[in-house]
Image (cartoon, rainbow, N blue to C red):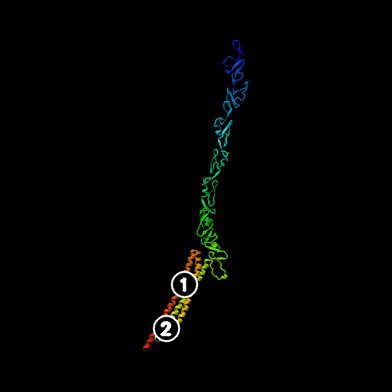
Amino acid sequence: MWGGQFCEIPFCNGTLATDSNVCNSLGVCVGPNQCKCLSGWGGKLCTIPSCNGILAFDENEVCIAKSNACSGNGKCIDLNRCKCEKGWTGPLCSTPTCNGTSATDLTVCNGFGVCVAPDKCNCYRDWGGEFCTIPTCNGTLATDPTVCNSRGICIENDECRCNSWGGKLCATPTCNGIVATDPNVCNSSGVCVDFDKCECFSGYGDAFCGTLSCNSILSTHINVEGAVCSGRGLCLGPNKCICQPNWGGFMCGFPKCFDISGDKKEVCSGHGDCIAVDTCKCYQGYMDYDCSSVVPDKNCGDSRRGASFWDVLVEGWDLIGDMASGAASIGSSIGNVIESLGTGFIDLFGGVIPNIADIFSSIPKLMEKILNFLISTAEKFINFILNLWTTFVEFIEWAVIYFPKIFSGITLQQVVTVLVIIGVALLLIIIIVLLSFLSPYITIALQFVKGVSSALASSEKALKEYNM
């Protein structure tokens, strides 16, 4: 226990106190097996290091204590030198690690969180995952199947890469590849309400509103049942039909009567319905092709029909018949006048003057016959003039009343028909009048020749008797 020349030097663990190795060279042997250790060391022989002032083992050096020497997270293997357990680092094992990176490193937790315990990150907002490597979009982790409204991939914080959708979070649909918020979407003629689904404005149609429509019928829907513009026009603007000439109104659904659409209040003079092209159905109390006339009272003596084209034509034909009859009568009157003139002339020169010898004695009788002839001829001539005037007035009256109506309310074919009928009638009238004129002339010419021949024969006979 002691040593030295005078046994004054103690031994510690068999080593003389004066030996440099005594007390593990980390202390002073101050008594038999009694070491006084240097700071930071402990134990009977100064073999136990301390970390952070705490011995690594207990005083008896019997068992290894999991003390707080290394913050309870490692072993103190030398003076203030710890061997940290997994997940810890630092001189005293007081700093956790996450994914092998110290909590004090700026890149720990992918730079988007705080390492608060071994491999445990508290991620910043908008990031997630064990080590804060997974971004979130609108608060949903990129690994969540509902992220980006299930229509894309979350590639950065609140940044989605969308599949056929648009917007920051794939919440905006696209139509024909154009995002709904683009002013050109749906050809600027509708609203993109879902993926490739446009709700078109009025007057436009098809999948992406690129086609004009009229009354919800596409402008391309032609020459088929239910065609655009009722099959009677072209859709050349939103809900704007350009109708065929004889049609008008909404979607060309109304016939025109004399250039007025059937849906206008002034059609058929406001007194009827336009039921077909240029065909009016008059209300009760009205008539004529355009319902412009009031039905006359039967007691007023107006026998005119005229509610339709054919009524007017029939009455015109009746009048033409009357004109033809009048023309025949006129011709007959002319013939009578001419015949009277001729007969009177022959009578004058044939009956009054049988021979030249009696010429002076026949003067009174000749004057009487001339007077009677003039009175008879004047009466017939006056009747002829009156008949001619009456017929002419009736024709003018009919023409003034009905010609404007006929030619403003009928088709071209009907106009041609009327003109042909009138032309034929006039031709017949001219032929009748010419025959009426020529017939008396031929008769009187023959009678005149006969009278002259007779007068010459009588004169010749009278001269012979006078000479004898």
Can you give x and y, in whole percent of width and height, for residue 118 in the image?
Answer: 58, 30
Q: Position of residue 47 (x, y in %)?
A: 59, 20
Left or right: where does residue 422 sit relative to residue 44?
Answer: left
Decide: is 58 above or below 431: above
Q: Is residue 301 above or below residue 257?
A: below
* In this view, the mark in front (1 or 2): 2
Quadrant the C terminus occupies: bottom left
Please report the residue visible at 45 percent of the width from the left and 82 percent of the height from the top: 371
Q: Nearer the viewer, residue 330 or 13?
A: 330
In this view, the residue in front, 378 or 391, is: 378
In the figure, 52 relative to 156: above or below? above
Image quadrant for the N terminus? top right
Amino acid beneath label 1: Ile
| Residue behind mark 1 | 429
Q: Residue furthest bottom?
A: 468
Toward which corner of the image does residue 440 lie, by quadrant? bottom left
Circle 2: is it few (<14), some (14-19), or many (20+) Cα within 10 Å?
many
In the picture of the structure, the residue carrying the numbered disc 2 is 350
| Marked residue nearer the N-terminal end (1 or 2) | 2
Binning the other alpha carbons within 10 Å of mark 1 as few (below 14), some (14 to 19) or many (20 upward) gives: many
